[in-house]
Image (cartoon, grey):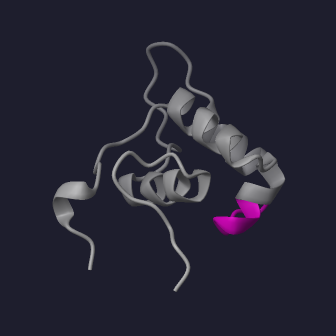
Amino acid sequence: MIEKSKLLQTYPTAAEVKAARESTGLSTDEIANLFGLSDGSAWRKKEIQKQGSKNTRLLKPMEFEMLLLIAGTHPNLKITDK
């Protein structure tokens, strides 16, 4: 069981999403496939945010948590083998 206090529970910015994806070493097509999206262009929309606009395509907090876990960059948690 994960302690709730270890979760970030924040909405990431487009720049944070892009940086986390780049940390995984996966292409936009590969990460899109992991998250059940149609293709890399669907994922790239999560990495773009024009100044002053509210991008509603960004990742939800738990999706961002999973991305950070995949990247190995979550500040409080990590994935380990059983």
Measuring from the top left, give residue 24's x and y in whole percent. 69, 48
Measuring from the top left, give residue 82's x and y in whole percent. 52, 86
Q: Is residue 42 above or below residue 48?
A: below
Q: Residue at x 70, y 63 (%)?
A: 37
Q: Residue at x 51, y 33 (%)?
A: 16
Which residues lie in the magenta part?
32-38
Is 35 inside the magenta-drawn segment?
yes
Q: Which image quadrant is residue 47 in?
A: top right
Identify which residue, 51 or 9, lies in the foreground: 9
The N terminus is located in which quarter? bottom left
Q: Is residue 32 above or below residue 18?
A: below
Q: Residue at x 62, y 29 (%)?
A: 48
Q: What is the residue that sits farthest to the bottom in this orientation?
A: 82
Q: Which image quadrant is residue 50 in?
A: top right
Q: What is the residue that sits farthest to the top in this orientation?
A: 51
Is 26 inside the magenta-drawn segment?
no
Measuring from the top left, give residue 80's x and y in whole percent. 51, 72
Identify which residue, 30 or 5, lies in the foreground: 5
Q: Is residue 53 above or below residue 66?
A: above
Measuring from the top left, give residue 67's x and y in whole percent. 54, 54
Q: Residue at x 17, y 57 (%)?
A: 5
Identify which residue, 4 or 15, lies in the foreground: 4
